[in-house]
Image (cartoon, rainbow, N blue to C red):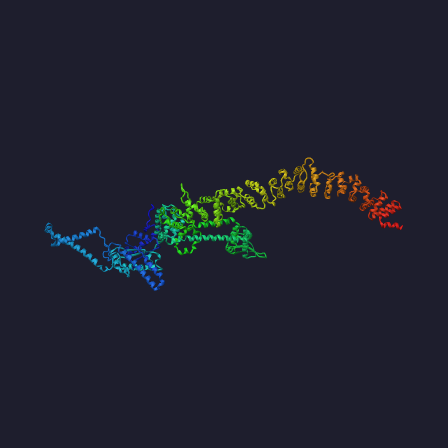
Amino acid sequence: MSENNINNLLPALIDKSDKAYVAVDELGRVLKGTLGRDSDEVSTGRRIKNVAITGPYGSGKSSIIQTLEHDFPQFKYLNISLATLRADSHLNDAKESEEVSNNFDNDNNRANEDETLDALNRRIEYSILQQIIYKEKSSKVPNSRLRRIRHFSNAELTQYGIGIIVFLLCFFIVFEPSWLRVDTFYEHFNFGTGNFWIDLACSIIMLVEIFLLIQRMVQAYSNSKLNKLNLKDGEIELQEASIFNKHLDEILYFFQVTKYNVVVIEDVDRFGTSEIFLKLRELNQLINESNVIDRPVVFMYAVKDDIFIDEDRVKFFDYIVTVVPTINPSNSKDKLKELLEQKGYSDFDDDDLSEIGFFIQDMRLLINIVNEYDQYHQRLIKENANLDNTKLLGMIAYKNFFPRDFAKLHRREGLVFEFLELKSKFIEFAQSDVVRREKELDDLIDSSKRDTHLKVNELRGLFINHLCNHLQGDIIRTIEVNNHSYAPTVISEKEELFNSIIKQKSIRYQYSYSYGSTSNRTESIDVQNFYGSTGFERRIKALELYQDQAKYDEIKRNLLSEKLNISSMRIKDLFDKYDVSVIPEYNNIKLPALIEIFLRRGYIDEDYYDYISYFYEGMISHSDRAVLVDIKRQRSGEYTKHIDHIENFTRELKPWNFTSDAILYVELLDYLVEPTPGATHKYLPLFYKRINRKPAPLKFLATYYAKGHHSKEVFTQFIASNPQSTWQQTLKHSDETERETLLCSWLRFVEYPVNGDVLKWINSNFNFISKFQEELTNDIIIKICEYAQFEQIGINSHNLIGIVVESNAYTITAHNISVVITYLDNNEQNGDNITLTKIWATNHDGFRNYIQSNFKNVFPLFSKSEKSETVEALTYIINHSELEEIEIGDYISGQTNLIPSLKDINQDRWYLALQKHVVKPNWITLQDYYNYVGKFDDALFEYIDKFANELSGLPFGSNGNAEGIFFREIFLNRAISLETIKVLTPIFEGYSFNGDEELVNLDTERLEWFLSHDMILFEEGNSAVIKNTTIFAQYLIRYKDEFIETISEEFLNNPSTVMTLLDSDKFNTDERTIIINNIPESLAFNNSSISNRIISHISTLGKLDNSPSYYISLINIASSNIRAIELGIRLISDMDNDVSVCNNVLVALGEKYSELLESV
């Protein structure tokens, strides 16, 4: 027991300061008014004779009565309690009569019930009569006919013996019978006259004793008519008549000879019958009206409020005192906590105390619960500190409310045991619930396929549009969310706004009609219900899950873990997490509220045996025994089955028990593996042998990995026993979820490096590593990455991808490189636009070195559409010796950034750099290239042609004759466009050609540009060359002074040139005359166009300086025209009408004019 004060169950005295004392004081005043000194003034009919103390069970009625007796001792109290009277047999008889009501008619049933109640009332009356009669000693009620065993004390026996002896002596002295005469005595005690006084005294003594004897005899024989009662063994034969009526005189006699004036009757209400109150009231009336007793007697009843129906109780009692309960469900927790703390127990949660105390409404019951808890705590928890105080308190409360069921629990019977036996049903239900949720998850993913082309916000937008269509108005402009108005498109784009509108019960919105008017409206609509009923809620959830693979994998893992945990869950947890209350078997038990709540809250659970009995060394529980029997019968059970007393359980095992899978229990393996100082458990090798066999018990191993505590030790030895075999078995395991669990465990506990098959699997299963990275831990992942080369990595986890990148544990693919760039640069990277610049921009030396060491394999993956490589990257690529120039050229062509100088590039790649235009325009660079190559090649020409504009703004900066060389090479090359020539002309100002034969091959427009910019001067060499070009006439015209000065027939032997010169307005009359005079006659007399232009000039000149034959030749070749006729006429006139000249002129003018000769 606790050292604290013992709390007994006796009624407590109520202090006068207590609120409950009002009832005591009120009762005292009632008794004084009826039994006090002033009561004689009250008429008999006005006296209070039946007083009720009413209140609920456990409200403190007994405490009030005891306090009343203590504080008002002037009254004589007779206490009668029916607490010890059992009416169970009669009540059971009544119930049985109800059950067989279908076999008898209603009259017979009613008769049976009446007989049962009569028998019960007789038992009550008999008990009251017993307590009245046996209250006083028999000497106090000597005339009672109810005889009792008389106990004579030694003093009484001595007294009676002395009295008889004295009577006999007196008799012998007075009557001196002769047959007893002894002469010696007579002589010795003969006092003479004194004998008279002796005889007189003896006679008086005899008379007194005879008087007392007669008195006793009269009393005895006056009650002889009751001898029909068998009182020998202290029992009264029960007959059908009322006990009160039959022994009324006995009761009246009792009150006649005693001083009792207050009869306190308790517990009479527990029988649920009101007829006994009628008889007690009748008895009270007889006692108070009897002249024999001649004093008032008050009957005081302690009863519950509900013993009478309606107004019956006020008709029966003269005065009612109501007791307000001191304990109820609202304060029972505080009372319970207070008493527990008095015992030294304070480590209870208030919520638990509230749950347990809710059912306690009786102070005595509460005190007893605390007392028994203290007793059990001293005996159980002090020996087993692992026991839970709250569970023990719950068990004690259950014991006090349901003692019979508690007793049955020891025998594995009763309601609680039936409930606990349903755990397998609960587990089955919970597992089916998980399977259902797994299927729903898969169905949800399948249903998302129709929306995979959409984004979540687009699907939200579809719902918002659907909602808007449901509202009134042609066009919904805005919808109010959180007191702010937003356009529907904004709500669909912002998730927080969308989630807020879903919760609304009404919508306020602004809308407009087709004709333009705008209005506001509030419409009641449960958006959440609308959201679900339209199917959008499911579609959006499905799409979100579909697009978040990591979340989907996490949910699947959680469901698997949950499924594995179910079999080891407590019943309390099963009730908390699953709706197992729908199971029919559970509902059929019909548990009382207290038991059901205690079981649901875990105050009573599978460990009940630990809280109701001692634990002895070597003992196993019934549950453990059932497991042991299954093992011996080689019947496999739940791997996670709890073993209550594992150490004792293991002692019961034998080596041959390890030859079947029935031995496979997680807790048993944990116990065997548990480190023991200096030794290994003798059965551990046998267990290992069982799991190391082929085929291995993979289901058990998967369960152990999830629920066991020594996975490292178990799986390390399992894998080491045969790595190749265990790996292949694991890969082929049929259950996908368990296979993933086992693969994870295998990778965690294998010794690295692993063989080729495993490594090949690892390389192709990066997603698996990502999925189980938390379980694998960083240490294991680092080991894996030392050897792995993942074929396709992902960025689901920054932690994992970080290790992969640091270890370069990935193959060179566009996808993988993109993932690494995305991870390092925190920028989403498309696999089609990889560049060296982006790789270097990550500033990760390891990644950069890995790429550069594998650059020949990486380079083909670079994007040919991305043209933004930095100068450094371009330089690195061009200079890379392992790359072919063709692939480099394809890649660098069109890059926007240019290398400043060829000096940064290896000379063997200068041609490529210039050809692909990746060098910044610079005349020095071009000179360096020319000096290296020694000539102008196509790359140089193309480069100059492309960057002419840039080069035009840069100084040539040459040394020596490089500028002249570049001038001639650039300007004389037909590959250089005229536009480039025009742009570069200012650079080469002052440079000109001198007889360069290449000019002949140039186009007219280019030559004209040269000529116009003084690049072709009038020199003999140039004249010789230009003569053969289309610009010779322009050349002569541009340099007319030099031309006229040095004119010769060599300049005028080309009809086109002559024609251009003659038509040019750049020459004056004299200059044109000089030109005409130097035209070869062969050309002038054979070309009608030239002849016409000469004739026109002569006509303009007005004089003839040449011979007639010259002019006649001109007229002859010229086409018939006015100018020729005029020249002929003028020639004839100048020749004084010379007939021959005239004839020749006419012939020269043609047939039309030659006919004139024939007519003459």
Residue 429 position within the rendered picture, expressed as x and y whole percent measured from the top left: 44, 53
Residue 6 position within the rendered picture, expressed as x and y whole percent measured from the top left: 33, 47
Relative to 927, say whether 638 is above or below.
Answer: below
Residue 223 position within the rendered picture, expressed as x and y whole percent measured from the top left: 22, 59
- Residue 215 can be seen, yes or no: yes
- Rendered image quadrant of residue 1026: top right
Outermost residue, top side: 960
Who is closer to the viewer here, 736 or 21? 736
- Residue at x 23%, y 56% (from the top left corner): 142
Relative to 408, say whether 942 is above or below.
Answer: above
- Residue 594 can be seen, yes or no: no
Relative to 285, say whether 363 is above or below.
Answer: above
Left or right side of 1002 for 490: left
Q: Number of marks in the image?
A: 0
Who is closer to the viewer here, 662 or 739? 662
Left or right side of 373 for 1005: right
Residue 363 position within the rendered picture, expressed as x and y whole percent measured from the top left: 35, 51
Who is closer to the viewer here, 931 or 967? 931
- Residue at x 18%, y 51% (from the top left corner): 162
- Rendered image quadrant of residue 40: bottom left
